[in-house]
Image (tube, helix red, strand yellow):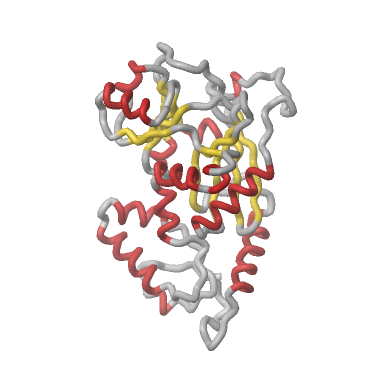
């Protein structure tokens, strides 16, 4: 196993049999016009041999950098479009700071109060900074461009699905408490999603408000069958094998909703992650056995 230095020629560091990468920072900087990052991304794409399997293709990672694109992608999956077993909460991209225009866009896309306001970019520390807007007065707190996504009560439980090749692992985390449906005069709540949903979270937005009388069995449950179908659909569509999905379950209907997708997440809470990753890499090697003298080096 070797660590690739993108500042150096890949030909001098390889050949490689499998490349695991997380180019999210570089891709984001390149999309924002950074010439150095653009050059590095282009060099990586050209120099990485076409016969070398990648854990994630550049175009797939780019899709997941934009929350709106990733939500659209979810809605196009067969399990969402035809079976309606899972979906994303209603959402709309807001590029205006005019409250009336915001309301019109929300009506067109069926986004209701309260809603969660998120950064368009689904990567980096700023992507965790969010707000819950409860009424029209709160629209003035929004700083576009952003995504407005209807809030769904889910009993303060977030299901983080971590995909490793053909397998997936579900880790339960704390999440936002329930709020009354519909408009209200409550002031906008600003929060960091990482702080609210980390394993040891003790935020006033979740732990202190959890209904202690409600057992896990009484809550709406996550369906392994639905999750598996979703993972299979995303893996095929994205052509990625290492990604994460954040899912909540509507407390009233039991309907599953995807609220975020991440490329190569942290895998916190996944037991035996590295053995699972190694098995996945071995599977990639078996599927792309060297032939005709190509990629005979055993480095990964």
Q: Residue at x 55, y 55 (%)?
A: 235
Q: How many marks?
A: 0
Name which residue lies at 61% across and 72% down. Answer: 287
Residue shown at the point (60%, 32%) measured from the top left: 255
Q: Is residue 146 left or right of residue 77?
A: left
Q: Residue at the top extreme?
A: 185
User: Which residue appears farthest toward the front when viewing the image?
Assistant: 82
Where does the N terminus fall, quadrant-wise?
bottom right
Q: Position of residue 213 (x, y in %)?
A: 71, 18
* Nearer to the camera, 98 or 23: 98
Left or right side of 271 for 49: left
In the rendering, at what x and y percent does residue 206 appear? 57, 24
Q: Is residue 291 above or below residue 43?
A: below
| Picture quadrant of residue 247 | top right
Task: Find residue 7 and report its image quarter.
Answer: bottom left
Q: Nearer the viewer, residue 1 or 114?
A: 114
Taking the image as shown, residue 143 lies to the left or right of residue 229, namely: left
Against 161, residue 195 (above or below) is: above
Query: Percent x, y for residue 248?
Result: 58, 34
Image height of 276 relative to 206, above or below:
below
């Amino acid at each position: 196993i070797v660590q690739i230095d993108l500042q150096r020629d890949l030909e001098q560091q390889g050949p490689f049999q499998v490349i695991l990468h997380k180019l999210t920072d570089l891709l984001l900087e390149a999309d924002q016009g950074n010439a150095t990052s653009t050059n590095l991304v282009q060099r990586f794409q050209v120099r990485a041999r076409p016969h070398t399997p990648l854990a994630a293709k550049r175009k797939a990672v780019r899709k997941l950098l934009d929350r709106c694109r990733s939500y659209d992608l979810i809605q196009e999956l067969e399990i969402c479009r035809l079976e309606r077993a899972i979906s994303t909460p209603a959402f709309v991209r807001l590029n205006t700071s005019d409250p009336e225009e915001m309301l019109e866009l929300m009506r067109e896309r069926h986004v209701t109060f309260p809603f969660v306001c998120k950064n368009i970019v689904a990567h980096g520390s700023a992507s965790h900074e969010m707000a819950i807007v409860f009424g029209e007065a709160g629209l003035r707190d929004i700083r576009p461009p952003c995504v407005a996504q209807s809030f769904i009560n889910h009993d303060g439980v977030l299901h983080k699905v971590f995909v490793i090749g053909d397998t997936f692992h579900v880790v339960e985390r704390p999440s936002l408490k329930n709020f009354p449906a519909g408009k209200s005069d409550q002031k906008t709540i600003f929060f960091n999603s990482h702080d609210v949903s980390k394993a040891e979270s003790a935020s006033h937005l979740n732990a202190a408000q959890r209904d202690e009388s409600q057992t896990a069995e009484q809550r709406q449950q996550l369906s392994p069958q639905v999750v598996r179908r979703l993972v299979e659909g995303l893996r095929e569509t994205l052509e990625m094998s290492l990604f994460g999905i954040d899912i909540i379950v509507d407390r009233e209907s039991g309907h599953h909703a995807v609220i975020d997708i991440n490329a190569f997440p942290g895998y916190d809470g996944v037991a035996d992650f590295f053995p699972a990753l190694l098995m996945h890499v071995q599977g990639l090697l078996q599927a792309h056995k060297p032939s005709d003298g190509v990629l005979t080096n055993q480095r990964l």
